[in-house]
């Protein structure tokens, strides 16, 4: 089997770290490059341990050793020469990297869902060419379920844990503090995505993401607190197909890096009796007011999803900083969207401009609230 050279963008984050372990353990994968935003300490450790050809930092602070690449061209240097790029950059900053993969015609293992949420329009060619491989666990599941289906499917059902507010008394949700919201029941993730899963904004992004990846298949969401079923497809005859197992991001990461049909190593050791009782229920929309708002931006298209994402990023940070209430997050997204005058996206700059303006508006609303 040929060696595949992997660029890991966002190597110091949770997905990036797990990817390095997988690449290290597999003789058919070679670490081409690592890139991080600013965690130079961990980047240096990774460089020493995993020996990539290129190590790069986007926002260097202080003394950076000369063999670490920095400056305006870091992204190009990290991506060029790779056989596949894992984009695990956090937030809207990941879109530029995804567009670059399309330009250089390099398969893109996509953990940065914002790329599709805010800039799906700009990635149409790569999507059409089948070169965007989802790393998001739900979409990886759908991809695998669809792989052997020859007939059209009726629908996609994304599972959602319901986050930390699932069982909270509804009148306590609005004022719940970060310590309560950050207690995610099943998945271990960064702070922002944990808040986004409590508001269900993350799931709304995933609905939009599914719309780009699996065009023309209707998408629904079901609450499944155990996170054992990683999503379903519904077949022509009404029966269901799913992928099950303990939540473990290494499974979708390995699948994407070995896509489309290379051999996979055993990662999980769980058995069905480890899972306990599996439950499914309808989503209570009152509990998650931001969900429909953000899903609607995907239907409206244009700059709306980028604006929702920017407003959400600002609001979530303000919440984590203790400046606003949890309930304000949905209200801020709503208000920023209602003030936005949308336009069609033709370039990265179009998206970035909408993003910048929305951040300014959101920050203004935050400072009025505190
Ligand atoms: Mg997910």
Image (spheres, rainbow, N blue to C red):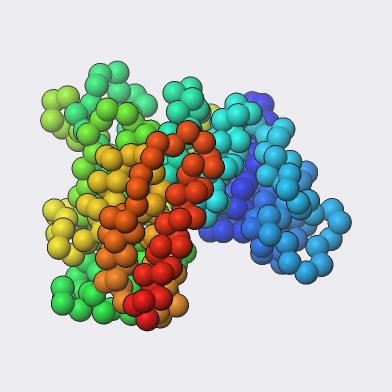
Residue 66 as seen in the image, left or right of residue 265:
right
Residue 181, quarter of picture: bottom left
What is the residue that sits farthest to the top in this orientation?
150
Q: Residue at x 59, y 56 (%)?
A: 17
Asked if residue 306 can be seen in this view, the reply is: yes
Residue 64, quarter of picture: bottom right
What is the residue that sits farthest to the right in this orientation?
66
Residue 50 as seen in the image, left or right of residue 147:
right
247 vs 166: above or below: above
Q: Residue at x 39, y 44 (%)?
A: 303
Q: Position of residue 16 (x, y in %)?
A: 58, 53
Q: Quadrant of the C terminus?
A: bottom left
**Observer-nearest residue: 331 or 35?**
331
Q: Quadrant of the N terminus?
A: top right
Q: Position of residue 130 (x, y in %)?
A: 46, 25
Q: Residue at x 60, y 29 (%)?
A: 103
**Observer-nearest residue: 17 or 317?**
317
């Amino acid at each position: 089997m040929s060696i595949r050279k992997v660029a890991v963008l966002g190597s110091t984050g949770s997905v990036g770290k797990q990817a390095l372990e997988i690449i290290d353990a597999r003789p058919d994968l070679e670490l081409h490059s690592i890139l991080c935003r600013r965690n130079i300490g961990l980047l240096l450790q990774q460089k020493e341990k995993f020996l990539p050809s290129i190590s790069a930092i986007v926002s260097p602070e202080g003394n950076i050793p000369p063999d670490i690449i920095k400056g305006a061209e870091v992204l190009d240097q990290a991506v060029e020469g790779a056989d596949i790029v894992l984009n695990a950059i956090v937030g809207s900053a990941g879109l530029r990297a995804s567009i670059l993969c399309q330009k250089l015609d390099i398969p893109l293992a996509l953990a940065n869902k914002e790329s599709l949420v805010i800039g799906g329009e700009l990635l149409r060619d790569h999507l059409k060419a089948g070169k965007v491989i989802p790393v998001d666990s739900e979409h990886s599941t759908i991809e695998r379920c669809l792989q052997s289906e020859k007939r059209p499917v009726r629908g996609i059902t994304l599972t959602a844990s319901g986050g930390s507010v699932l069982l909270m008394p509804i009148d306590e949700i609005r004022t719940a503090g970060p310590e309560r919201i950050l207690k995610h029941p099943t998945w271990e993730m960064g702070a922002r995505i944990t808040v986004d899963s409590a508001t269900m904004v993350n799931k709304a992004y995933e609905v939009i993401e599914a719309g780009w990846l699996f065009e023309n298949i209707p998408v629904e969401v079901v609450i499944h607190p155990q996170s054992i079923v990683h999503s379903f497809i519904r077949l022509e005859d009404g029966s269901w197909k799913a992928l099950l197992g303990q939540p473990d991001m290494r499974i979708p990461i390995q699948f994407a890096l070995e896509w489309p049909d290379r051999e996979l190593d055993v990662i999980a050791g769980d058995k069905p009796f480890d899972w306990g009782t599996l439950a499914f229920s309808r989503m209570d929309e009152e509990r998650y007011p931001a969900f429909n708002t953000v899903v609607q931006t995907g239907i409206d298209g244009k700059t709306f999803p980028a604006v929702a994402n920017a407003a959400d990023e600002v609001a979530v940070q303000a919440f984590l900083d203790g400046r606003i209430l949890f309930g304000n997050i949905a209200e801020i997204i709503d208000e920023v969207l209602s003030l936005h005058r949308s336009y069609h996206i033709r370039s990265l700059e179009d998206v970035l401009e909408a993003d910048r303006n929305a951040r300014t508006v959101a920050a203004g609303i935050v400072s009025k609230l505190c």
